[in-house]
Amino acid sequence: MSTWLFLLLSLVGQILAKNPPDMKCLVINLENVRCTWNSQGTPDVNYNFSSRFENEKESSCAEYLTDNGTNIGCKRPYTKFLRFQPFYTTLRYGRETYLKKHDLKGKVMLNPPTNLTVKNGSDFNLWFYWNQTDKHCVEYQVRVRTNNNSWDQFSAYLGQSYCQNLPSSTARYELQVRSRIEHSCGQSEVWSDWSEPVVWGFNNTTDTNKRHEAMPVWTAVLYVAGAITLLLLVMILLHNERIKIILIPPLPKPVLNSSDVKDWFHFSKGLIKEGFNANFSERACTVREYQPVSRSDSNSSDSSVLTTTTDQTDCSIAIAVNEPEDTSAPFYTRVIASEEGQQVSA
């Protein structure tokens, strides 16, 4: 039983040794060739790697990629245009050797674009820009999403800019871009990774490399126009007295003795002079108190009259109250004396 178990384990070990992980090679940014053999997991054995382009001598791996001490890949230098030639790789483990031929023409993986920026254009559109390490023979693909919704992906095109037409000032725009070798230079099947996102819009004005104002262009224009208008008004008021009087009428001075009083008071000249005479005075009148007189002392009429003499220089006013209902009670008579000393009774 133990013999059969030993033979089974030996057969499984030979099968695993004869079937190494699948080999995949990419030209990274036209700078080096990276080959890996861990797509199905880290292998159980350490393979030795060597490679060559056609018409080249085979060379060992100069820089291994490892995982916990186990070789999982190799990175070797790349010479321009060699990707159009066949590429041969060799994995060795003990006595076993595994050869594979690769076509690297469509296996170029560029680095993602960098330095993404966003600007408000003079055409009131939103413009996104980016940089690429090698600008020649490169096409780009852009994806955009608004307000954290799903991504809208656009077809590949040439150029290092993207225009968002008439953006909303209340929306948030997020953009990413990736690149690859375009058709005229031997189109690659592999896109680069997506770039870091650049963000513009409401309540979020930051992007990966720069910070931009999210202020809509019309708001900035209105601020500038308002400041210029205010400055012009101040200059006009300072240099044009007539417009200054129209916009800010002066208040009249409250001087009653001035000759300008007649211009803003609609009264006759005589009334103004008399009414606003600072030396105006009036003779004072005295009030006298009268004593009651009995009705029995009066013979001339039904109502007795109380008389008094007044000095010609005096003006006196007396008030008396008649009480005709009660004949026994005293009554008062009003006597008004004029300035000439005449008596008027009531």
Image (spheres, helix red, strand yellow):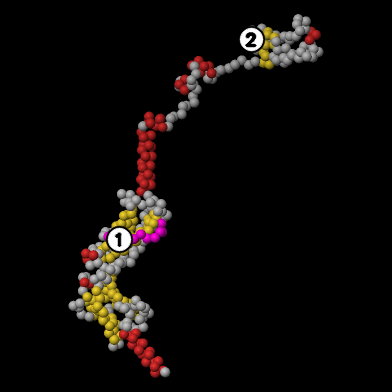
Q: Mark 1 or mark 2, which is nearer the start of the sequence? A: 1
User: Magenta segment range?
Assistant: 147-157
Q: In this view, does 273 lie above or below 342?
A: below
Res. 183 image quadrant: bottom left
Q: Residue flagged by tag 2: what amino acid is it?
A: Glu
Query: What separation in Å lies between label 2 and label 1 (alpha carbons)?
Result: 116 Å
Judging depth in this view, the residue of 319 and 174 nearest the camera is 174
Q: Nearer the viewer, residue 319 or 45?
A: 45
Q: In which quarter of the image is the C terminus?
A: top right
Instruction: Identify residue for label 2.
Output: 339
Quarter of the view holding residue 109 = bottom left
Q: What element carries label 1?
A: loop
Circle 1 residue: 155
Residue 30 is drawn in which quadrant? bottom left
Q: In this view, does 323 lie to the left or right of 84?
A: right
Q: How crowded is mark 1: few (under 14 residues within 10 Å), some or many (20 or more)?
A: few
Q: In this view, does 182 lie to the left or right of 275?
A: left
Residue for point 76% across, 7% down: 302
Residue 207 colored in magenta in the image: no
Mark 2 or mark 1, whichever is nearer to me:
1
* Residue, far top: 300
Q: Which residue is drawn at 36% across and 41% down?
A: 228
Residue 198: in sight, yes or no? Answer: no
Residue 228 in the image: above or below residue 61: above
Quarter holding the N terminus is bottom left
Say which mark, if any, is on residue 186: none
Q: Residues within 10 Å of mark 2 (few under 14, many from 20)?
A: some
- Residue type indicated by callout 1: Ser
Secondary element under disc 2, as helix, strand or loop, is loop
For the point 73% across and 10% down, the residue is 306
Residue 261 position in % (x across, y down)? 47, 21
